[in-house]
Image (cartoon, rainbow, N blue to C red):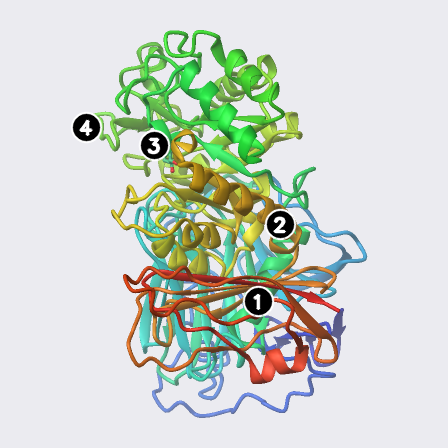
Amino acid sequence: MITFEEQSGIFHLRNDKMSYVMQVVRGKYLLHRYWGAPLRKFRDSRAFQALDRAFSPQPGDYENERTFSLDVLPQEYPAWGHLDYRTPAYEVRLADGTTATELRYAGYEIRPGKPRLAGLPAAYAEDDEAETLVITLKDYAGHLTAELYYTIFADLAIVARSARLCNTGKDALTLTGAASFALDFPDHDFDRLSLYGGHAAERSLERIRLMRGIQETGSRRGASSHQQSPFLALARPETTEQAGEAFGFSLVWSGEFSFRTEVEQFGTTRVVGGIQPDGFAWLLEPGESFQTPEAWLAYSAEGLDGMSGNFHQLVRQHLLRGPHRAALRPILVNNWEATYFDFDDEKMDALAQSAADLGIELLVLDDGWFGRRQDDNSSLGDWQVNTEKLKGGLKGVAESAHKRGLKFGLWFEPEMISFDSELYRAHPDWVLRAPEYPLSYSRHQLVLDLSRQDVRDYLVEAVSRILRENEIDYVKWDFNRHITDAFSAELPPERQGEVRTRFVLGLYDVLERITGAFPQVLFESCSGGGGRFDAGMLYYMPQTWTSDDTDAIQRLAIQSGTSYVFPPITMGAHVSVVPNHQVGRVTSLQTRFLCALMGAFGYELDITRFSAEEREQVKQHIALYKQLRPTIQLGNFHRLLTPFAGTKNETAWEFVSADGRQVVLTYFKTLAEPASPVRILKLAGLEAEADYEITEYLPAQCTSVDGAGKPQMQVKGQVYGGDELMHSGLTVEKIDTDFAAYLWVFNKI
Ligand code: DGJ
């Protein structure tokens, strides 16, 4: 998959889906040459034009040529402040204050498979599944070496990139920026796509024209965040979900990050992504090195859906780990929206009883079971069960679940500490805080200093003890505030710029130790909902709570947005009560079910209070979900319509089982409209030659007073060709009601 031509200096990473080409020019500069559809051979048809750029101080090579300038050439890992004014990949301050350095090509190595990145989550691959190119660049004056890693996978249009920077000089130096990758495109005819949001409103898609100048998508919150996600895509203006070119970028990193795009004077585009450089300063003593997080670069000639398909395969086959990686996820009930902090053994027992009757498989006890916690003011850090609330302790609740054939799960928020806690009274120096300034709170809580070994050891033991002493099958790992005042009492002044990064590395150490010691436990990460939904967290915990907003209509956007990078199996999605607790909306049980069905499915309401009719409906939903679960969780996903484009009033999701035999299709129309055109859905990913029979049909439920617009179509049992469903399409029966939701299940004949 990787070749190097000595004479031309061309590196070509190639598989059936993609080519990525670089070139060593003049024996020293590593330039980017091409990324896109696969090329049999790169013969330099788009040679650099040796233009005289006219303006004499144009920075050039040492020979002072007017026609060769690093400021316009596409570079793979450009420096700050030296011959290139565009956004740099790395910034460094040498001991004497010099900031201009020059990394020159020094050699390469091609390895089978994919090396691990020490202390960091990253995609993994067997030796026959991928190949890795390591290119070494050495600083002209010998202070620094960079190893650039490029992994190409046999069957994916993805390159995984990262960099390792090593101090090879005699004095200490400070990295003030270390991106995972930089990449130059020869033009700027792109739309720029990013995912933005807020708490309970994560990951809506923003699609705008790529602007001249610099634009940034990023986080300075110490976490990947609700506000912006570590994802960026450049797509051609004509690119749709199903057609056209798209270039996607995602980081395997849970901390603050930055994606910068820069369209420069000659209309080329640079993309730089990695750890947020603002506030970052990492001291490297001679011989020490810094490994950047990994970035994934996904190419698609088949629209945004094709880009997502690549990311989904990578996540499912090369990121998720452990026995739960490709295991069907249990249907759960979580007591948070059912009880909040107001629960006891009896309430939990009643939930367990109802859960078992309904066919639910896992009972989760959320926040409030420990210390003296009655609300969110106290006790984070005191991970001992509150026996006033739970007289039988955790063992009692676990037993009440287990004896009914349910699994039992428990909530933690280990990275946090309450001011009102035994832990804070014992270790006030364990929090992140600026020494001379007041403590800064968020949700009444402070953040533990995970850069410290003693804090990490305490956490590993505190959580492990609970998992050892109780029969716990699932853990929800929450993180309910962002980082401020990132000062560690233990680090010297010259290392304080490392704290935000060390916090995340410390978290990864804790997660590796705990998840490694309890492989049978299913972990779900959470951060006030989906505030840390990123590939870094998924490496340790194979599913994430997608959002604290459980309203089915809001979730259409949140889950569609999340699916640009992450597959359905990773998304926690629950049916909750109406009126909905976040937005007050009333939607039907069917609409809530069909929306939550998209992911790792569950309930989050007081299931003991269902009416007899609701109970019957829920039982049917659960039985149906169990039939469809392998297709939804282990199959391929397609976005047919999203609330971000077109009418913005419709969403359609399609799931095709791994063997292609079952197809699940859902369609949602948010607001009913008069005189709206007939909706025809064109399916994706079917076999054109095969026939498909509709085996299940749930039309929207009519709510109009006179019953007008009731479902009429007899669609169950109908047979259509795959070609017909993909090219001619399927008509959606028009039913006049707000928040309409439909389901079709097809079986390939
Ligand atoms: C935020 C989570 O997203 C909720 O589901 C719940 O666990 C609360 N935290 C508990 O404090």
- Tags 4 and 1 in contact by the CB under 8 Å rule? no
Mark 1 closeness class: few <14, some 14–19, many ≥20 residues within 10 Å: many
Which residue is under mark 1?
298
Q: Given this view, does label 4 or label 2 mark the residue nearer the observer?
A: 2
Per the image, the residue denoted by label 4 is 437
In this view, the residue farthest toward the front is: 706
Q: What's the residue type where badge 3 is placed?
A: Pro
Question: Can you say whether 472 is above or below 480 in the image?
Answer: above
Residue linked to disc 2: 629
Mark 4 in CB contact with mark 2 (< 8 angstroms): no
Ranked by sequence position, the earlier of labels 3 and 4 is 4
Q: Which of the 4 quarters of the picture holds residue 117?
A: top right
In the image, residue 247 above or below residue 595: below
In the rendered picture of this protein, how many numbered marks are placed on residues? 4
Q: Earlier in the sequence, mark 1 or mark 2?
A: 1
**Residue 638 at what x, y percent from top left?**
56, 66
Residue 169 visible in image? no
Residue shown at 39% from the left, 72% from the top: 192
From the image, which quarter does the N terminus lie in?
bottom right
Q: Callout 3: few (<14), some (14-19), or many (20+) C-alpha neighbours within 10 Å?
A: few
The 10 Å Cα crowd at callout 4, few under 14, some 14 to 19, many 20 or more, is: few
Q: Work out how far the residue at label 1 is from the one at label 3, CA to CA, in angstroms.
A: 40 Å
Which quadrant is home to the C terminus? Answer: bottom right
Q: Amino acid at mark 4?
A: Tyr
Is the residue at mark 3 in contact range of ligand 1, meaning its CB lies under 8 Å from it? no
Type of amino acid under label 2: Arg
Query: Looking at the image, which is closer to me, 631 or 540?
Result: 631
Q: Amino acid at mark 1?
A: Ala
